[in-house]
Amino acid sequence: MSDSHFRAADAVLSAKGRSFHWARRFLGERHAARATRLYMLCRYVDDIADEAESVPAALQALAKMKQDIGSGRSTDPIVADGIRLFEECGINPDTFIELIAGVESDLGTVRIADTDALIHYCYQVAGTVGLMMCRILDAKEAAADAHAIDLGIAMQLTNICRDVGDDAALDRRYLPASMVGGLDPAALRQPDADTAAVVRAALSELLQLADRYYQSGERGLAYLPVAARAGILLAARVYQAIGSTLRQGGFAFENGRAVVGSGRKSLITLQALADFILHRRYWRVLAPHDAALHDPLRRISVRTTIWNTRHAD
């Protein structure tokens, strides 16, 4: 990768992934560089879906990306660097193609039916990132994968709770109908008192669910190389704090995005580093993965290559 390409990737991370940019400094140089490149590729996919002039144009661009990744060749410099990254780290290209499939679903009518469908979506767009990060961080044990998926799911659940208004402006409702009924996204942009109450209850429930996945993600840190554990713990803690900020604000989603300021990030950093040093759960695996966390994926019959080969039971 050229210096100019890395600088461009770093600029994207700094501007659009501030929590990850903060945590990256606690990874080793090689792992930090790889993670930055992966972030740029994933952000590129998101931007195609969110910023395209039309849905057909976005679908066409994503189809071309899938074709390029499948063939192992691309004239697009960002995709080409992603292909090189996959080869360097032993990342199965099908994992990223599954991520693209999740992003493609954003281009249709987004009205999530229930929590199973929501967890499935979170797996596609973020659990897959957890899987790829295992390869980027040189995790050797396959048991790490399930925990990495869970951390990705937790972070995406946090995103969804934070971005209710922004998603509604794009005519998307990720809050499950099983929790909020058939609410139209328009109703989420300027909610009346009854709508706000229903949404706040849903946010509370979803953030509790996210916390279960965060706990599983942390339990898997002992599978990572020692030099990578603190950085991933910090990324998880900073992201989880977004949910805490929402709680402290009474789940007032209509007031805009919850933000974790630099002062609070510093406190979270100190607490995370202290926990990392003092608690043995970050130094040895204390419990097996909670298979029930993946029941929604089994119920919805996720049958990707990665799922079948790594998680069949």
Image (cartoon, rainbow, N blue to C red):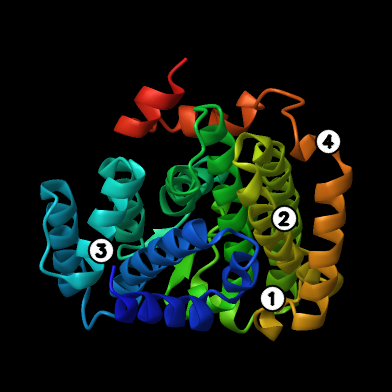
Which amino acid is tagged 4?
A: Arg
- The answer to the question of whether label 1 and label 4 lie on touching residues, with beta carbons closer than 8 A, is no
Q: Do residues under tags 3 and 2 come within 8 Å of each other at their CB atoms?
A: no
Q: CA distance from mark 1 to mark 4?
A: 37 Å
Please give the label number shown on residue 253.
1
Q: Earlier in the sequence, mark 2 or mark 1?
A: 2
Residue at coordinates 39% horizontally, 61% vertically from top-left? 38
Mark 3 neighbour class, 10 Å CA radius: few under 14, some 14 to 19, many 20 or more: many
Residue 137 in the figure: left or right of residue 63: right
Is mark 3 in CB contact (under 8 Å) with mark 1?
A: no
Q: Earlier in the sequence, mark 1 or mark 4?
A: 1
Percent across and percent down for residue 21 are 57, 72
The answer to whether any part of residue 247 appears in the image is no
Camera-nearest label, 1 or 4: 4
What amino acid is at disc 1? Phe
Residue drawn 18% across the image and 52% down it: 69
Give the mark, 3 or 2, whose residue is nearer the N terminus.
3
Q: Quadrant of residue 218?
A: top right
Question: Mark 2, residues whose alpha carbon is within 10 Å: few (<14), some, or many (≥20)?
Answer: many
| Tag 3 residue | 81
Q: Mark 3 to mark 1: distance in Å?
A: 37 Å
Name the kind of residue labelled 2 in the image: Leu
Count neighbours of disc 4 (C-alpha within 10 A) and say few if under 14, some if 14 to 19, many if 20 or more: few
Which residue is the site of mark 4?
A: 280
Mark 4 or 2, closer to the camera? 4
Asked whether 306 or 277 is in front, the reply is: 277
